[in-house]
Amino acid sequence: MMIETDEKISKLRPMMKISELVPYLKKKNIKFEKISEQEAEDYLRNNNNYYNLTSYKHNFLKYPSPAGEYEGLYQDLDFAYLKDMAIIDHRVRLLFFKIIIDIEHYLKIRILNLIENIEEENGYRAVNMYLEKDFNDEKFPKKVHNSIFKKVGSEYYNKIFSKYDIDQDQQLENIPIWEFLEIITFGELVNFYEFFSKEYNLKNELKNIFILREIVKLRNAVAHNSCLLSDLDRKDNSYAPDYKIINYLNGCEIGKETRSNKLSNSRIRQMTYALYMFNEIVTSEGIKKNVTKDINELFFRRIIYHKEYYNNNGLLKSVYLYFKKIIEKNYNVNSD
């Protein structure tokens, strides 16, 4: 068995040392004119890994067929461009992390405010119904229960839930909604919001569910430090956008063709939805002002700091112009 495993491993692509990566990239016609080969090697050793950094190369064109010896090689790509995109991506992740945690916080506030206007809701009824449904779910029983049990081990959550005398063999009940919302994940929060809205026939609230589910995907990518700005030309989302988003983008003077093109990319769609929902659900003008300031700094200063790198990149220029219209319309930033 060990011999068979060794044979399989021997057929796998060998791991490359950092000193071998620069020559490998040069074979793909990635240049080292704006940054030296030694600087690039130092960057790969100390600041970023090869896999993450080179994921951005998919945003750049290769020579099409037939192109002789250049066929399949990159047309206009310097290592410095990849480094710049990695830095921008990091800043974008930090910005959207901030935006998403604010969306999550104000979604909780929205739910609590809705409860006050529902006569049959006492702060326990919907949670008990939701936990009962979760406990007896045929496909995934106790999914939320198990998530809560894992968290109760921490000192912070144990203080909250110790009074409920949690027994993992028992169905949870009588947890007040204001405490329940603080222990479930963002994905579970959206699921509860949908359950809650259906139970009380809150049709206007249900219209937000599809949008929020896309934001949950973005939140998971940000939380796992996944690259957001790679493969921006990939068409991997064919679902029709919510009419709220269509109206939103129409208000930004983004036409049907551009809208269809950009929203067919999952990551662009998710970021669009987050920008939309932030202004829809956050009620603090101070927080909005703070986020607007961050967007202004990132979008109109850092992202274009090396704009000359992308003069020949139609894809990245079009993505920038798409978000530029959204930001100028909804975040009151001055591009000057």
Image (cartoon, rainbow, N blue to C red):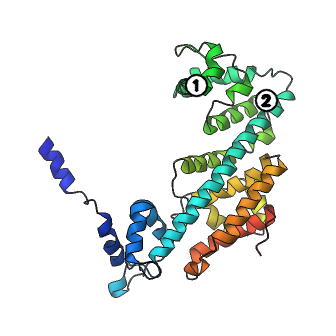
Q: Quadrant of the C terminus?
A: bottom right
For residue 13, side relative to residue 45 (left or right): left
Point out residue 85 in the picture as x, y percentages from the top left corner: 54, 68
Give the mark toward the camera: 2 or 1: 1
Give x and y (percent) for residue 32. Answer: 41, 79
**Residue 176 position by quadrant:** top right
Q: Is residue 94 above or below residue 201?
A: below
Corner quadrant of residue 301 = bottom right
**The residue under label 2 is which amino acid type?**
Tyr
Q: Amino acid at mark 1?
A: Glu
| Sequence-first tag of 2 and 1 | 1
Res. 239 visible in picture: no
Q: Residue at position x 59%, y 77% from top? A: 306
Which residue is under mark 1? 155
SS class, disc 1: helix
Contact check, label 2 and label 1, Cβ < 8 Å:
no
Q: Which residue is mark 2?
A: 200
Secondary element at tag 2: loop
Name the outermost residue toward the bottom.
68
Q: CA distance from mark 2 to mark 1?
A: 35 Å
Q: Is residue 248 above or below residue 180?
A: below
Q: Residue at x 63, y 61 (%)?
A: 263
Instruction: Give the position of the N terminus as an image quadrant.
Output: top left
Name which residue lies at 69% across and 42% down. 104
Q: Is residue 36 left or right of residue 115?
A: left
Residue 284 in sight here: yes
